Structure formats: structure tokens, C-alpha cells
Image (cartoon, rainbow, N blue to C red):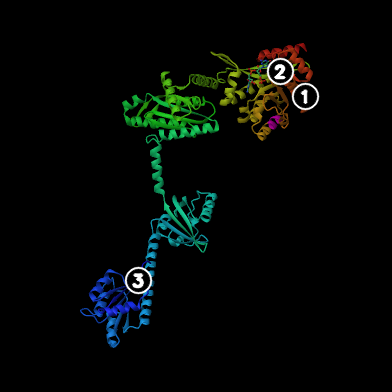
Amino acid sequence: MTGKAKILIVDDNPNNRLAIRTILKGIDAELYEADNGFDALTMAIETEYALVLLDVQMPEMDGYEVCEQLRADARTADTPVIFLTAAYKENRDKMRGYSAGATDYLTKPLDDHILKAKVHVFLRLYWQYQQLQENNAALALAASVFESQQGIVISNADNIIVRVNKAFSEMTSYSAEEAIGKNPSILKSGRHDTDFYRAMWQSIHNLGAWQGEIWNRRKNGEIYPEWLSITPVKNNGVITHYIGTMTDITEYKSAEAQIHQLAFYDSLTGLPNRRLLLERLQHGIEMCVRDNKLMTVMMLDLDNFKPVNDSLGHLAGDELLQQVAGRLLDCLRTADMIARLGGDEFTVLLENITHADDAAHVAENIITALSKPFYLVLEHKEVRIGVSIGISVYGQHGTTPQLLMDHADAALYKAKDSGRNCFAYFSEDLTIAARSRIELESRLRGVIEREELLVYYQPQVDIATDKIIGAEALIRWQQPVEGFTSPGQFIGFAEETGLIDIIGAWILREACRQGRQWLDAGLPPLVLAVNVSPHQFRHSNIISLVADVLNDTRFPAHCLELELTESGLMDNQDKTRFILDNLRQLGVHIAIDDFGTGYSSLAYLKHFPITTLKIDKSFIDDIPYQQDDMAIASTIIAMGHILGFKILAEGVETPEQLAFLLEKGCDNYQGYIKSKPVPAHEFARLLRDQQRDG
Ligand SMILES: Nc1nc2c(ncn2[C@@H]2O[C@H](COP(=O)(O)O[C@H]3[C@@H](O)[C@H](n4cnc5c(=O)[nH]c(N)nc54)O[C@@H]3COP(=O)(O)O)[C@@H](O)[C@H]2O)c(=O)[nH]1
């Protein structure tokens, strides 16, 4: 409520008007005057008056008529009017005044106190009326706000719903009757954990509000996203209610998803586009820097796509591209990314890889996958295409997205130049290395079926008696064209690719079969040592493999020793112990190979049921010239004996080495001084010679 109340004094006599002014001097209102009925009516319509003091006796238009006209007009119908009339007037004149619409009467000569008192009363009524009007307007406004587009739910201090609006009911399908008396948790979708709600209530109580995106559930079970704001209402600092306003953002979200799809994905194949690829590439580079990881970019270009597109038309071309996208996805891990840059160009991003040539494997898989024929449904035709792939490696070929892309592109042209349907790295040496590794892998895969593997045996000798007491089974690969390939060239690779599991199982079976045959042929019993690689130890079921092989070949368990490296044991102590205990229960011996080169923790090894330690060849080589190596070798022998292990020295080549080991009490040795690894028949001959010589 602003401004001052206005009072209109209507009297043809200026003295009377002055007299009234004088009486009302100091009153909290503005006084206006009219000296005739016509002016009074005009003024009353133009301006809102809190009160009209109206003289009855006036020429031309008397007070009755003025009052009647005021009442007849909606704008002035409620304006209070006090008639000022002569004291001698009859009572019926007063009645006429009331029926004309008078609110009150005052008689002349006016009593100062009565006039002032009445004016005060009317002014107070006027202000109360104004307040009422404002309150009504505010209530009407609040009601229209409450019934707005947004859903509103009001709950009490115990978070029980006390009111909801229509929009809430439309959004949630809960009518007001169904919602009132319940907890707003009837809307819970189950998609948020307790931490989410805890944070929400913390914000409401500590910060005075919470707003955010939330998944809620409609009465029919449908889950939908909404934007929710919750504000507590306080009275004297105590929360009395919570007001939640909610907007269903389902459409906004799907529009947002649509915009995202259009901005970041190729509409034909649904694959990420160049924009998303560059973002991922940038992110991948940051990860490489942070975690010192490897990443490669592979640029793909389809060979023979253009002729298909030109001859069969664009619809067929589109179908082919969609099928290509599907096959590419099948070749990749979910963590990898494939993007279509446009036309028949695709880019693959391999993050978090171990070796640069992992990309070559993926490239080979892609080349194989795309070289199979495609059946185009629209054209009822089978078509064949190929793919050329250029590869760049983060770090070696660039450290920015643009350089990596450019260099993958340059490598792509190298691949095309070298006959298409192949891959090339940006640098020649990587291409050569990767291609030869892939070739090695493909040759190694069929090695057992092609019967190219052989087992050689290297005698293990008792130092004290110089008698052969066992042999280490060592693999040999004899290829028809390439010839002999030493294990050093392929064991590590077989380990990386997991092929070692099949190869290791084969050599175990072959050694046990051979050992049984020697026993059956009357040769003296000896211990055959077979290497078990770390991959084989961790990933294959070594316990059941050994049990099966011993059972199938009938080779005595106590004649078998499994050689493990320390690194193969270190991974998971509990699992290692479980496996070793089970192997020992079968009766086989356990030897630690290459001892001294790894962790070399005797304290650690004593927790495992180990029978033999093999001192690595590198500590034997420089005996008797290297004091350090001699000290290490004699310490291993002494400490190993204290812990109950047998000690075997590897790679013994000279009599000096042998004499030193004998002096230090080493149990057994293995080395060229006795014999190189030899084929089975030669080893049998060595044994027979020994038998014959007694
Ligand atoms: N997981 C498997 N690993 C195997 C298997 N067969 C072999 N290997 C591992 O390959 C590495 C190379 O083996 P290889 O070329 O056979 O060499 C062995 C011996 O020939 C060689 N040796 C033995 N004595 C001497 C010597 O006096 N001088 C000399 N220069 N070399 C010698 O040492 C190799 C035996 O090593 P180890 O296994 O550590 O006892 C080698 O790491 C093999 O382990 C297999 O079937 N599975």
C-alpha cells in the first residue's frame, strides 16, 4: 500500500469548504475540493477517494443526485459518502439520503471532534479495505502460480505430502488423494543410491535448497528424468514444510541425446564421427602422458569399394558400409574406438595396449574379417572388398592428434603402395617387426598338428658321483623350410600370446611318454625336469593337466620335476601355494629355475613346497674369475641347504666351475661339460653307456 488516502470535499460554499479543511488540518490524507455536483462526479470517477464529504444543498445538482450517480457507477459505487446537512432537516430527509446511498450523516454546523473522529474511522476502513484487496490479489497470484506447468509437491516437516498440484498429478499419475499422506519416496526409481539422497538432504538442510536431475518413477512404473528443486519453508527458524517443484525433462533429454547423436555420430553407420574421434584421441593422449601407456591410431581405407558403389548404386554402397561397420566392431574390444570419417574411410583407436605391434594383430583380424564376401540384401548380390590400414603409434610417430592422424594416413598410403589389403606402420622397422611376428604366430599356431616340435634332453648330473640322475626336457622347433628355430626366438612370444599353454602341455606329455618308454626299456629310473612357463602356471589348470598326463602315460610322479621361474610364483601367494601343494601331493618335484636372477628371496620361497633350486648360468659363467658370482653361488648353496633344498648349478662348462661347485657342496649340475641337450635316442645312448660302465 503506497501513497496517501484522498478525501473529496463537495460544497458550493467556499467558507464551508475552508471550515472543513481547517478542522481536518493535520489528518493523514490529501484533501480535494469541488464546488458543484458535476465536478465532484468527474473527479470521483478519475481518482479513487477514501471518502467523499458531500453537501446536500447545492444548486443545479444537489447532494442526493450526486450520491445516486456515484452509486450507479461501478467505479464509485463503494466510495463512502458522508452527507453534510443542516441540523433542522427532517428525519425523512436523512432517509432519502440513505436511500440515495449515503454511508453516514453529519449535521451543520459541524462538530470538529465528530467530523475528525468519523473521518479517522473511514480512513482506517479505507486502508483495511486496501489491505484486503492486496491480500486477495496475492492469494489469487499464489493460486495461479501453484497451478503452474511445473509439478509442485508440499510436504510437512516429517516429509509427508500435504499438497500437490495438478501438474504433479499429471506428471506422476498420482492423484492428490493418492499422494497426500504419503512420503515423496513413492516416486523413487531405484536408480540412485543412498549417498545420492544423503547429499540431497544435506544440501537442503545446510545450504537451504537442493536442485538437480533425478530419475523418478510414475505410478505405472515408468521411470522418467525430472529436474527437481526442493526448498524448506521455515517459521521462526524451524522447518515447517518442504516445497518440491519438478519438471519432466524426458523430451529435453531425448532432444539432447538426438543433438549429441547428430553432432558426434555418423548417421549411416551409427559409428562415432571425426569430431568424437578427435576428442577421444586428445583424451587418449592425456592418458598416455599420465599413465605412460601406449596408443595407436589406425587409418582404414576400403579397397574396391568405389567400383561396388559405382556399379550397384549408392543404396548398395550404404548397405555395404553398414555391414563393414558391423564387422569392424566385431574385431574390436569394447574399450577400442572405431569412427567413420566419411566415404569408405574409417579410423580405429586402440588405447591402453601393451606393445606397438598389438595393433598389427588387430589389423590382421580386420583384414581377415573384411576379406570374407558380403551379401547385399537389396541387390541380392555377393561382393568382395579389402582394406588397407595405416598405423601410427603415440610417442614414436607423434604426440598430437593431428600428427598421429597424418602419420597414420601416410602409413595407409604405404600399405596401398605395397599391394593393398595389408597394414603398414608409419615407420618401416615396426612394419617389418610386426609382420614377422604375425607370420611367426601363424606358423606357431599349427606347430603341433604339423609335428614340427621335438624334445631334446640335457643330462642332469650328480656332482659327487658324476652319474646322470635326470634330464631337463627342452623344446626344439624344426621347420621344413626355415629350418631350426631356437626356443629363445619363440618361447617368449608363445608366452605373450598364450600359445605356450598348448606347447607346454605337449612337451609335458611327450617327456612323460618318453620317460615311461625308457623305464619300460629297462633304463635306470631318473628325474625328468619339464619347464612350466608363468602363463601356463597362472592360466591353465596345471594341476589336472599334470594328473592326467601322469595317469595317461603311467610315468611315476616322483620321476617328474616341474621347473618354475620365481616371477611365475610371485603373482598371488595363496593361489601359488594351493597349486604347489596339490602338485606336491601328486608326488612331483618342484624346482625353481634361473634362481638368483629374479626376486631371489629364500625367505619367501621357504613358504612353498619346493624341492630344488637351480642356480642361474650367469653366476656360473665367470667362476673362478668373478668373486661376486662365486660368493653368490656359494651363499645360495649354503642357504638353500639350510632350508632343505637340493641345489643344481646350470650351464657348467669348465672343470674349474665343476671343482668349485663340488667344493661348495652343490648337489647336481647341468651343462655342456657333460652334454648339450640331445635328441631322445642320443640321451638313451648316454644312459646305456653309463649303465654299461657301471
Ligand atoms: N616354457 C618352456 N621354456 C622352454 C622350453 N624349452 C626351452 N625353454 C626355454 O627356452 C630358453 C632357451 O632354451 P635352450 O635354448 O634349450 O637353452 C637351454 C640349454 O640349452 C642351455 N644350456 C644348458 N647348459 C648350457 C651350457 O653349459 N652352456 C650354454 N651356453 N647353454 C646351456 O640353457 C637353457 C636351459 O635353460 P633353463 O630352462 O633355464 O634351465 C630357456 O630359458 C629355456 O628355459 C619348454 O619346453 N618350455
Residue 382 pos. (x, y %):
37, 27
The segment highlighted magenta reads 580-585
Q: Earlier in the sequence, mark 1 or mark 3?
A: 3
> Is the residue at mark 2 in contact range of ligand 1, meaning its CB lies under 8 Å from it?
no
User: Magenta stretch mostly in which secondary structure?
Assistant: helix
The residue singled out by tag 3 in the image is 5
From this view, report whether residue 575 is shown above or below residue 237.
above
For label 1, the crowd category at 10 Å Cα-Cα, with few meaning under 14, some 14 to 19 and many 20 or more, is some
Whole-number angstrom distance, CA of label 1 to CA of label 3: 114 Å
For residue 466, say whether it is visible. no
Question: At numbered mark 1, what does the secondary structure look like: helix, strand or loop?
Answer: helix
Tell me, yes or no, whether the highlighted magenta stretch contains residue 277.
no
Q: Earlier in the sequence, mark 3 or mark 2?
A: 3
Question: At numbered mark 3, what does the secondary structure look like: helix, strand or loop?
Answer: strand
Whole-number angstrom distance, CA of label 1 to CA of label 2: 16 Å
Residue 316 pos. (x, y %):
34, 30
Which quarter shows the N terminus?
Answer: bottom left
For label 2, the crowd category at 10 Å Cα-Cα, with few meaning under 14, some 14 to 19 and many 20 or more, is many
Numbered mark located on residue 390 in the image: none
Residue 641 pos. (x, y %):
77, 25
The disc labelled 3 sits on which kind of residue?
A: Ala
The disc labelled 2 sits on which kind of residue?
A: Ile
Numbered mark located on residue 620 in the image: 2
Quarter residue 579 falls in:
top right
Which quarter shows the C terminus?
Answer: top right
Whole-number angstrom distance, CA of label 3 to CA of label 2: 116 Å
The disc labelled 1 sits on which kind of residue?
A: Ala
Residue 282 appears left or right of 496: left
The residue singled out by tag 1 in the image is 638
